[in-house]
Amino acid sequence: ILIFSQGKVLMVKRPLTKKVNPGKYSGIGGKVEPGESYLAAAKRELQEETGLAIANLRPYGVTQSVTPSFNAEWVHVNFLATLPDQVSLPSSEEGDFHWLDPATVEGLEMVSDLKAYVQILAKNKQAHLLGQFIFDQQDKLIEKKIQVF
């Protein structure tokens, strides 16, 4: 989930102790529970990780991540929301929350798909995205495809 407010995007810097994407900036999210819809999962994860209940969540895209080191292909259903005001969030087990200028994300250690997505959505919040990101055995990005609709 990416949340925009006053020209900035809310990101969480994950602790180094996390198994997936340690030390990287990420959006808010998690796994879908059995029988749970994608929207219900997004709302639950948002509430669990930030304490926020946001009514205007909407899907903005789907990402396929081919990750041989995990012996998996991850499919992410991505959501977007906007807030009128930036809220301050305390650190949690998920990490430290920061409001970032989308123009600065290129230089940050960040989940690969989000760098491009943040920059696209900062310019057009109505964009719909399909992404495919392919990684090698060392988790280095070797191919990226993004379609914007």
Image (tube, rainbow, N blue to C red):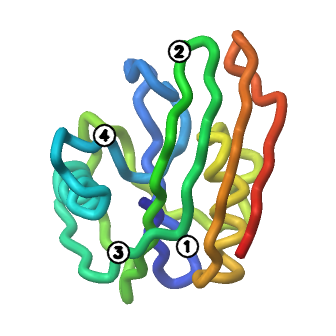
Label 4 Cα crowd, 10 Å radius (few <14 / some 14-19 / many 20+): few
Q: From the viewer's perspective, is residue 38 above or below residue 17?
A: below
Amino acid type, label 4:
Lys
Residue mark closest to the camera, 1 vs 2:
2
In the drawing, what numbered circle is on residue 31? 4
Q: Determine which quarter of the picture holds residue 80.
A: bottom left
Does the residue at mark 1 contact the one at mark 2 (Cβ under 8 Å)? no
9 lies left or right of 68: left
Amino acid type, label 3:
Leu
In the drawing, what numbered circle is on residue 57? 3
Of the two numbered discs 4 and 1 on the same chain, state the one appearing first in sequence. 1
Compare residues 113 and 89 and report the one nearer the observer: 113
Does the residue at mark 4 contact the one at mark 1 (Cβ under 8 Å)? no
90 lies left or right of 116: left
Specify the quadrant that holds the N terminus. Answer: bottom left
Label 3 Cα crowd, 10 Å radius (few <14 / some 14-19 / many 20+): some
Of the two numbered discs 4 and 3 on the same chain, state the one appearing first in sequence. 4
Q: CA distance from mark 4 to mark 2?
A: 16 Å
Of the two numbered discs 3 and 2 on the same chain, state the one appearing first in sequence. 3
Identified at 36% across, 49% down, the residue is: 29
Of the two numbered discs 4 and 2 on the same chain, state the one appearing first in sequence. 4
Does the residue at mark 4 contact the one at mark 3 (Cβ under 8 Å)? no
Amino acid type, label 2:
Phe
Q: Determine which quarter of the picture holds residue 69.
A: top right
Question: Residue 142: where, in percent of width, then height?
Answer: 83, 28
Q: CA distance from mark 3 to mark 2?
A: 29 Å
Label 2 Cα crowd, 10 Å radius (few <14 / some 14-19 / many 20+): few
Residue tagged 1: 8
Q: Residue furthest right?
A: 142
Specify the quadrant that holds the C terminus. Answer: bottom right
Residue tagged 2: 70
